[in-house]
Amino acid sequence: MNPRQRRGLLLMIIAALGAVFVFITVLGYVGNVRTQAEAEVGEMTPVLQIQSPVEAFQPVTAASVKQAQIPKKWATSAFVTNLTDLQGKVAAGTLPAGAYLQQGMMIDAPSLKAGQREIAIMIDAETGVAGKVTNGAIVDVYASFSSTQNGRQTTAACAVRILNRVQVINVGQLRNQSRNGGQQQSEGAASGQVVPITFALNSSDTLKLTYAESFAQKVRLALVGGTEDPKPPFNRLCETPQADR
């Protein structure tokens, strides 16, 4: 081996040793940074994280969440950590994927109170506020009646509010409307689609809604906003059950 080859071999050995030294130095630096980061973050704790979006007023199930780890010092008692806390709960609003689940993001699922009856009626898309009625919505229920004649007595056509500020507890799936579904479904809506709307009502309001569904030409829902609601006077043309004052 001549001197030039020996110098080349020596340089290669020095370069290899330098590369090993740099690798060990970088590895040690990364380890120190990781150790410092873990020391700053501290102990981790498990929480529940949304893994698939949950729509407002829909149940929050075990399938829609996953367990994640966050620094314990950043966690509060508001974070949901146990799957058992999901029982009987629905989303208070739309929950996006990736959000850490907290108590204020869920509410108790609507349930029947003492004396209430669960009743559902079919509402077509036009009279159901064009799909804006959702679970938990507050609505008024209106019914329109066509004119009738009984012997010499004629009852004029009219519209009346039969229920005032009632809560929708469930909105079903859109389906094709039956052509022989009763007087509520007018000829203009015969080829449309309907959705079952479920309410929790007392016995008196249940009777009013049943009467309207059976004899009204059309039943309409009106979304109600705010907490104050000045009630209009009764429509005296209708001899039908009406909303309480």
Image (cartoon, rainbow, N blue to C red):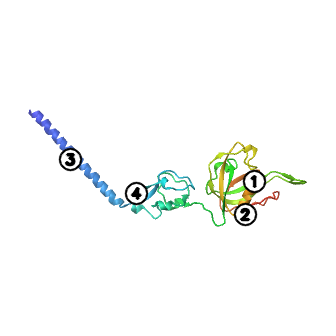
- How far apart marks 3 and 4 lie (CA) works out to 36 Å
At horizontal 64% and vertical 49% (from top left) the residue drawn is: 131
Mark 4 lies on a secondary structure that is strand
Front residue (pair 150, 15): 150
Asked whether the residues under the numbered discs 3 and 2 touch, taking CB atoms below 8 Å apart as contact, a structural biologist would say no
- Amino acid on which the number 1 mark rests in the picture: Ser
| Image-quadrant location for residue 201 | bottom right
Q: Which residue is mark 2?
A: 204
Query: Which tag, 2 or 4, sits closer to the chain's start?
Result: 4
Mark 2 lies on a secondary structure that is helix
- Mark 4 Cα within 10 Å, few/some/many (few <14, many 20+)? few
Q: Which residue is mark 3?
A: 21
Q: Nearer the viewer, mark 4 or mark 1?
A: 1
Q: Which residue is mark 1?
A: 214
- Amino acid on which the number 3 mark rests in the picture: Phe
Asked whether the residues under the numbered discs 2 and 4 touch, taking CB atoms below 8 Å apart as contact, a structural biologist would say no
